[in-house]
């Protein structure tokens, strides 16, 4: 097992990580030799006025919920206040309403104690369950690389989304009346235009024509998907085949599976958990991880949509990521400092009632408990709870965003990078090997908030990090990939990855007969 | 003849329907028990009411009415089986809808539902008991002699049953309730049933509310019975809350049991059926996937086969390898040839349909609302009042299918029953039509829906083909897919062009309003959007897998240009 003590010490103040070459992270002080992107910080001011106004697009469900809570408050006011003595009410009415109120209170406190997150405001809930560190004051609220091309979408604090494309001069800005508190964005696979946005009250799917010269696509380009009781949405995931979209809300025990083109959704309801917070679709499309606000997560099998329950001991599942072949799941649990791993192997494919048989218990693969490093600037404590995980598409690098402690200067939030190998040559070794690469650090005074790997970087892996300063940096890890990973343990033929790059097969010549 | 050919496969559908009816009958006792409790419960005497309910449930009349209810459910189930369709009939104009409603077949359906409504209402009257129980009440005449009079409470309930049954049947036509749609998310039957149960309950209660409201209005004006003891056709008589409650409860019960039967039927019939890709015995060959796909089967079987193809191409490598395999003596890829040929002909048919429609629109400057029939190369000059599409699915059938008395099983085969044609139902002189353009006029949105009415088949064909092509990159040992790749690509790109052009027509891309609170399925309204999305995804699936290798595939310059857009992710 790997632990942080094996890591090289963090960089001295003023140094920033640039890239990985020859198995070590190189650092520098200058910022010129880096791909960088500064975002305007003035967007902070715009957002403050929005919360002062009520939303007009409340659903009937929300209105009735509000009305219920109003009646509840009114009842408690009249019954508890001394005024009620003055008002002449029939005895039986006051007694029965008192009983009802007591019952309601007992029920709501019981429900609230079972699922404390239900008492939170939706902004707090988004901040609590987001994969972004300190989501509420983060300039970059969500980030998404396009799965096939070099373009990405960035959701900002002022609820606008910008799309950057190196091949085009225009930078479209997406704004919509319903696009508020963006928790996640994701591009549709096998499509050039569609971008799904998880908002506070609904799900938006933008269709942004890459050839269009417009910088402000109209709100008519966005499809609005909503379902009563399904808000706020904290996580979304497209199926790798691009056909379905799943969305999760901590307030809704059902996970929605959307057929976006026909705007119809199927709720998949299961008892327990109190909601769904985080979703991750395995790259081969066979499984979906769905974590809940309580100490339980589910792994759905996507063929007949049945699920396995995985109860955790300590807290909820905070983050998770899949290996490129979809056979392994790494996840972290809130309140613990370790990374767990689960292995999934499919039963021989082709059986109509195909259910996945997983392992019986999760194995600990890395311990990230707090470790003190001596640096020229004093002791730095690294480790602790994990905010999010990211695994690069070749399956060779794993980035772990550690929360740190915002109050203590010597416990910064930091990204630890591991080298991973899922198929060791010797069978005696455990299936999963983690080797340390190092820590990724930014400019002094900034902390990493969000990270994502580029889906098809040719020379290794490219980690994109969004910093608290609003800066987005791309960090290449140069290495030679060990080739196409071998799929599965059982040796059965497996699905080709949709994002499998033809570059790997460039040597083979196809269609020779047709050319001659 | 076709029944003999596909005996076993047709039986599959029949047995599925029987299983769904059996489940509906099994679910009837608990639903009836709940109904008895709700209808008889009184807040003031709860214990007495419960004991009364229990004693009623064991009485002979209760058992008799329960048997009647079972009979009705079985009847409803068979009507579902008789009238269902996998391709919705889309009425493009008010007149076409009227034609559908006045069709003799529909008349038989409405009559059946009326009678069954009366039977269920009679059972409800027995169940509720009290003043509703008998049709005749003893009443004292002016001279004091006892005589039997009409009990209007009983009658109002019976007529309510007939009215609700009739309106259910009419709404079924308007909302396409007989249309059976397939879901994109596959779930086990029990979970699908459980997921839709609350929706069914809600739909039944709201529809019952509206039906009872309409019924009360009708009854107020028409319900004059001279023999009645308590005349109810006054405002005071009808505003009896207990009466309204019992009417609503009974109507909800009636609609809930029928909707439940329909839901079970849909769930059972649309379940995935796994056809064998190939069989080692020649006598089983007609049950194999390539044969079922290509045969002119009942549409439902063709749809199930296409669904199975889409799923196997996506999920099961072992069945895919059977598709890519060569025949043992001879070494021909018969399975792949049959499958790809059928899928391509489906797609080519849609392309032709779209081009033909676009051409008519282009030549006229606007949609030719009066002569949509002729664009389909059909027999507007002959005496046939109905339109047959040029679809290869329907080609071999004789035109007399369209007589109202044709067998329903055959009727189901007549693919998109395009009723956008003004010749639907009755033969009309064109002069009459020109005089009433308002009623005949069709909206482009609905025309577009009608064009894509059977597009679920095309969606599966696209998915099946593209997944097979994708997996052929690593799994196809003999290169059987490679030879078909140019035709697959040009077919898809041609369809893409036609679809693009179609969506540029006015109103073609306007989204329909979705009504979630109805038992009718509105999936068909959005099929064209689903098809467009699937088409793009399918082409991208092929281009991302093969990348620049596709430059070596022969194709026309125009298609090459289009393909380049996909390779650069600019579509």
Image (tube, coloured by chain):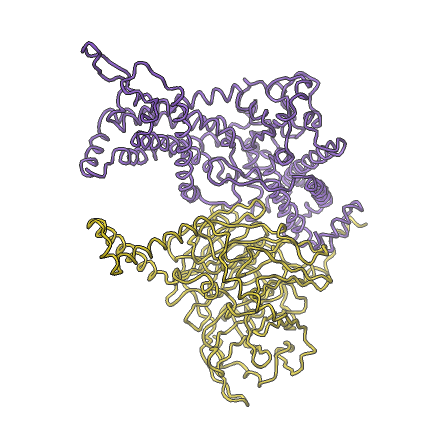
Chain colours: A yellow, B purple
Instruction: Using the rendered image of the protein, determine whether residue A490 is visible from the camera's viewpoint.
Output: no
Q: Residue at x 48, y 56 (%)?
A: A248
In screen coordinates, is B25 left or right of A140?
left
Q: Quadrant of residue A508?
A: bottom right
Instruction: Using the rendered image of the protein, determine whether residue B122 is visible from the camera's viewpoint.
Output: yes
Rendered view: A205 above or below B454: below
Front residue of this view, candidates A188 and B49:
B49
Front residue of this view, candidates B210 and A415:
B210
Q: Position of residue A206 (x, y in %)?
A: 61, 54
Front residue of this view, candidates A498 and B557:
B557
Q: Position of residue A387 (x, y in %)?
A: 49, 70
In screen coordinates, is A346 left or right of B447?
left
Q: Residue at x 38, y 23 (%)?
A: B220
Q: Quadrant of residue A502?
A: bottom right
Q: How many marks?
A: 0
Q: Residue at x 20, y 31 (%)?
A: B55
Rendered view: B530 above or below B255: below
Front residue of this view, candidates A226 and A312:
A226
Q: Position of residue A111 (x, y in %)?
A: 33, 58
Q: Position of residue A430 (x, y in %)?
A: 49, 70
Rendered view: A41 above or below B370: below
In screen coordinates, is B346 left or right of B193?
right
Rendered view: B440 above or below B269: above
């Amino acid at each position: 097992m790997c632990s942080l003590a094996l890591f090289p010490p963090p960089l001295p103040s003023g140094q920033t990580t640039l890239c990985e070459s020859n198995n070590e992270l190189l650092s520098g002080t200058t910022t010129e030799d880096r791909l960088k992107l500064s975002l305007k910080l003035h967007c902070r001011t715009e957002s403050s006025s929005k919360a002062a106004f009520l939303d007009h697009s409340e659903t009937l469900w929300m209105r009735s919920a509000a009305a219920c809570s109003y009646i509840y408050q009114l009842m408690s006011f009249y019954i508890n206040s001394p005024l009620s003595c003055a008002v002449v009410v029939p005895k039986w009415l006051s007694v029965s309403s008192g009983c009802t109120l007591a019952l309601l209170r007992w029920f709501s406190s019981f429900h609230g104690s079972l699922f404390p997150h239900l008492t939170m405001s939706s902004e707090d809930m988004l901040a609590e369950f987001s994969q972004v560190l300190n989501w509420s004051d983060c300039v970059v609220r969500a980030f998404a690389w396009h799965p096939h091309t070099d373009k990405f979408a960035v959701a900002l604090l002022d609820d606008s989304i910008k799309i950057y494309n190196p091949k085009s001069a225009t930078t479209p800005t997406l704004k919509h009346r319903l696009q508020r508190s963006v928790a996640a964005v994701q591009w549709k696979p096998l499509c050039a235009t569609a971008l799904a946005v998880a908002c506070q009250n609904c799900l938006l799917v933008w269709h942004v024509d890459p050839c269009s010269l417009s910088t402000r696509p109209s709100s008519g380009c966005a499809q609005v998907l909503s379902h009563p009781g399904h808000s706020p949405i904290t996580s979304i995931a497209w199926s790798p085949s691009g056909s379905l979209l799943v969305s999760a809300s901590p307030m809704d025990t059902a996970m929605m599976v959307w057929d976006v083109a026909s705007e119809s959704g199927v709720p998949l309801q299961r008892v327990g958990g109190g909601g769904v917070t985080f979703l991750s679709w395995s790259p081969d499309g066979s499984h979906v991880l769905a974590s809940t606000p309580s100490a339980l997560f589910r792994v759905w099998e996507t063929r007949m949509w049945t699920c396995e329950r995985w109860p955790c001991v300590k807290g909820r599942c905070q983050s998770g990521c899949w290996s490129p072949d979809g056979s392994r799941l790494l996840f972290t649990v809130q309140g613990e400092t370790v990374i767990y791993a689960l292995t999934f192997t499919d039963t021989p494919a082709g059986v109509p009632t195909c259910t996945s048989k997983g392992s019986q218990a999760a194995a600990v693969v890395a311990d990230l408990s707090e470790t003190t490093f001596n640096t020229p600037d004093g002791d730095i404590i690294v480790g602790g709870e994990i905010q999010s995980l990211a695994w690069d598409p070749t399956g060779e690098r794993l980035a772990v965003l550690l929360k740190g402690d915002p109050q203590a200067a010597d416990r910064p939030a930091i990204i630890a990078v591991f080298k991973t190998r899922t198929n060791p040559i010797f069978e005696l070794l455990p299936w999963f090997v983690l080797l340390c690469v190092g820590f990724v650090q930014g400019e002094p005074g900034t902390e990493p908030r969000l990270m994502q790997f580029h889906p098809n970087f040719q020379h290794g892996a490219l980690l994109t990090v969004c910093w608290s300063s609003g800066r987005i940096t791309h960090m290449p890890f140069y290495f030679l990939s060990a080739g196409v990973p071998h799929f599965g343990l059982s040796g059965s033929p497996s699905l080709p990855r949709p994002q499998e790059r033809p570059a790997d097969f460039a040597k083979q010549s196809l269609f020779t007969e047709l050319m001659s | 003849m076709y029944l003999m050919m596909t005996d076993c496969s047709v039986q599959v559908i029949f047995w599925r329907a029987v299983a769904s009816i059996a489940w509906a009958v099994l679910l009837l006792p608990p639903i009836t028990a709940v109904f008895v409790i709700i209808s008889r419960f009184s807040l003031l005497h709860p214990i007495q009411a419960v004991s009364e309910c229990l004693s009623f449930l064991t009485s002979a009349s209760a058992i008799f009415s329960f048997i009647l209810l079972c009979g009705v459910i079985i009847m409803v189930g068979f009507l579902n089986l008789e009238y269902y369709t996998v391709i919705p009939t889309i009425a493009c104009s008010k007149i076409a809808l009227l034609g559908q409603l006045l069709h003799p077949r529909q008349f038989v359906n409405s009559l059946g539902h009326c009678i069954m409504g009366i039977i269920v209402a009679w059972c409800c009257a027995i169940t509720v008991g009290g003043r509703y129980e008998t049709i005749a009440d003893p009443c004292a005449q002016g001279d004091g002699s006892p005589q039997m009079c009409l009990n209007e409470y009983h009658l109002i309930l019976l007529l309510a049953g007939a009215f609700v049954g009739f309106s259910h049947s009419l709404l079924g036509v308007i909302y396409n309730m007989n249309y059976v749609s397939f879901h994109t998310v596959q779930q086990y039957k029990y979970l699908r049933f459980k997921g839709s149960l609350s929706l069914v309950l809600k739909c039944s209660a709201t529809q019952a509310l509206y039906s009872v409201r309409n019924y009360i209005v009708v009854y107020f004006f028409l319900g004059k019975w001279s023999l009645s003891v308590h005349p109810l056709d006054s405002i005071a008589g009808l505003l009896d809350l207990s009466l309204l409650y019992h009417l609503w409860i009974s109507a909800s019960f009636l609609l809930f049991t029928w909707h439940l039967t329909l839901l079970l039927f849909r769930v059972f019939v649309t379940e995935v059926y796994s056809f064998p890709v190939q069989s080692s015995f020649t006598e089983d060959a007609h049950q194999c996937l390539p044969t079922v796909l290509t045969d002119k089967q009942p549409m439902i079987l063709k749809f199930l086969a296409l669904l199975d193809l889409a799923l196997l191409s996506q999920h099961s490598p072992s069945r895919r390898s059977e598709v890519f395999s060569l025949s043992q003596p001879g070494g021909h890829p018969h399975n792949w040839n049959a499958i790809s040929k059928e899928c391509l002909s489906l797609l080519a048919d849609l392309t032709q349909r779209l081009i033909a429609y676009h051409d008519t629109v282009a030549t006229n400057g606007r949609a030719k609302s009066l002569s949509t029939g002729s664009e389909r190369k059909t027999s507007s000059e002959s005496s046939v009042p109905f339109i047959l599409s040029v679809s290869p699915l329907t080609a071999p059938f004789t035109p007399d299918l369209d007589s109202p008395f044709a067998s329903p099983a055959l009727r189901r085969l007549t693919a998109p029953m395009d009723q956008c044609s003004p010749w639907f139902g009755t033969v009309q002189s064109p002069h009459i039509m020109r005089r009433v353009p308002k009623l005949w006029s069709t909206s482009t949105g609905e025309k577009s829906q009608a064009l894509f009415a059977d597009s679920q088949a095309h969606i599966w064909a696209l998915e099946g083909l593209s997944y097979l092509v994708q997996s052929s990159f690593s799994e196809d040992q003999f290169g059987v897919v490679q030879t078909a790749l140019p035709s697959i690509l040009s077919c898809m790109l041609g369809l893409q062009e036609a679809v693009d052009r179609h969506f540029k027509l006015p109103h073609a891309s306007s989204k329909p309003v979705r009504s979630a609170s109805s038992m009718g399925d509105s999936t068909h309204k959005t099929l064209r959007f689903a098809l467009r999305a699937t088409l793009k995804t399918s082409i991208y699936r092929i281009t991302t897998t093969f990348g620049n290798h596709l430059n070596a595939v022969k194709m026309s310059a125009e298609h090459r240009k289009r393909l380049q857009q996909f390779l650069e992710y600019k579509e």
